[in-house]
Image (cartoon, rainbow, N blue to C red):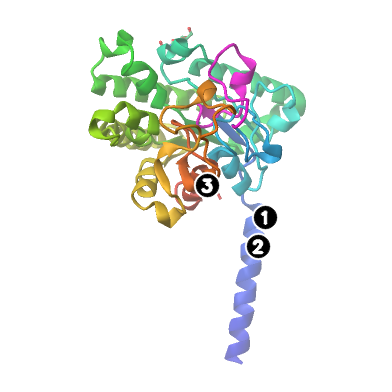
């Protein structure tokens, strides 16, 4: 008797969970802002050399197609969209092959080479960050025409927003040209960037966003290109850069606590990637990686964008054994590691 009872209870509990699952608000779309870590090809439609819409980029993507993703395959945001049960790839907003109907379930406004700071995007003639937010406003208008104001507001409220940006503000801008470094200390520049991130959250909140993930700064001192610049120390990671990333991440955590208090009904999460990269570098075999310090493309020491091309015979055979696809960007395998980690930790509140 008791035995039967407990089976019933288990079954009931199961039904209850199923019901909950159906009624609970789910993520309606994944909407992405940022740089090359999450650009799916917006740069293909602007005048810039900061592109990757040629082989061997995309060689492990659907149909081996180079889309403008700085990767051999999919990006972490593609995997995240798939994990939320939406769609396996997030299209670029400027790609004319897609319509507002496609973008309604997810879109990326990101542009390779851009940064939070206007100076960064100006240096390489890519989409400035403020313009990504303008595109989002235009997107909202198009959605309203497509599905009406009510449905648009529901969609934007239930959508999941991901920001992945900031490395270029240091690597292209602060450490390369004096425009900012002659006026700001590292600490001041960190605060400036975090202020811009805060403005971003306020801006999209006012436009209806409620579920937001701010991607942490990665250990950018360990990017293959940065290691190459550090040849005097045998291509070790640049620990000064990694320290800056850690400082930024401490400040980012504080900012997130503040935003969650200030903005009613918002849920902002910190999506940590720094530790994920360091762990993969320290214990590559537990992820199936064999190379942690070079890109797969070319010699792996410096190639990215036009320098990573099909005329280079040195490109590795199996990119899944590499953390990095080119000298700056993760391989598809690493993007999967990053997204799996986020789904199991930071993004749990949105499942
Ligand atoms: C960046 O440029 C835009 C457009 O010119 C401007 O509205 C914005 O204030 C600038 N941002 C900063 C931080 O200078």
Task: Please give the label number shown on residue 320.
Answer: 3
- Give the secondary structure at mark 1: helix
CA distance separating discs 2 and 1: 6 Å
In front of the other: 282 or 259: 282
Vertical side of 240 occupied by 73: above or below: below
Q: Which residues are magenta?
A: 33-56
Q: Is residue 74 left or right of residue 98?
A: left
What is the quadrant of the N terminus in the image?
A: bottom right
Report the residue marked by disc 2: 18
Q: Is mark 3 within 8 Å of ligand 1?
A: no
Q: Is mark 2 within 8 Å of ligand 1?
A: no
CA distance separating discs 1 and 3: 36 Å
- Give the secondary structure at mark 2: helix
Quarter of the rendering containing residue 103? top right
How far across and down, in percent of the image, does residue 238 sit?
Answer: 28, 32
Magenta run includes residue 44: yes
Residue at horizontal 33%, vertical 19%?
192
Q: Nearer the viewer, mark 2 or mark 3?
A: 3
Residue farthest front in this picture:
313
- Mark 1 or mark 3: name the one nearer the start of the chain: 1
Vertical side of 8 occupied by 231: above or below: above
């Amino acid at each position: 008797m008791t035995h039967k009872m407990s089976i019933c209870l288990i079954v009931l509990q199961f039904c209850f969970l199923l019901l909950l699952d159906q009624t609970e608000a789910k993520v309606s779309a994944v909407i992405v802002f940022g740089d090359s870590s999450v650009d799916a090809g917006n740069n293909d439609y602007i005048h810039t050399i900061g592109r990757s819409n040629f082989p061997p980029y995309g060689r492990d993507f659907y149909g081996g197609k180079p889309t403008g993703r700085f990767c051999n395959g999919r990006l972490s945001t593609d995997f995240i969209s798939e994990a939320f049960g939406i769609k396996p790839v997030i299209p670029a907003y400027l790609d004319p092959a897609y319509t507002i109907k496609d973008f309604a379930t997810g879109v990326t406004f990101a542009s390779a080479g851009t940064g939070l700071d206007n100076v960064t995007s100006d240096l390489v003639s890519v989409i400035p960050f403020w313009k990504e937010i303008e595109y989002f406003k235009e997107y909202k208008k198009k959605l309203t025409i497509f599905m009406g104001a009510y449905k648009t507001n529901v969609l934007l409220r239930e959508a999941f927003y991901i920001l992945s940006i900031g490395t270029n503000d240091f690597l292209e801008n602060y450490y390369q040209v004096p425009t900012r470094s002659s006026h700001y200390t590292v600490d001041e520049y960190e605060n400036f960037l975090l202020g811009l991130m805060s403005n971003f959250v306020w801006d999209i909140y006012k436009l209806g966003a409620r579920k937001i993930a701010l991607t942490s700064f990665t250990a950018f001192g360990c990017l293959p290109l940065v290691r190459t610049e550090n040849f005097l120390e045998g291509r070790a990671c640049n620990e000064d850069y990694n320290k800056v990333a850690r400082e930024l991440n401490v400040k980012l955590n504080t900012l997130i606590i503040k935003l969650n208090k200030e903005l009613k009904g918002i849920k902002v999460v910190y999506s940590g990637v720094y530790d994920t990269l360091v762990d993969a570098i320290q214990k590559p075999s537990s992820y199936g990686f064999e190379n942690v310090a070079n890109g797969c493309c070319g010699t792996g020491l410096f190639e990215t964008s036009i320098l990573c091309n099909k005329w280079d015979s040195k490109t590795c055979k199996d990119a899944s054994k590499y953390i990095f696809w080119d000298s700056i960007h993760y391989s598809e395998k690493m993007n999967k590691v990053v997204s799996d980690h986020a789904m199991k930790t930071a993004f749990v509140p949105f499942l």
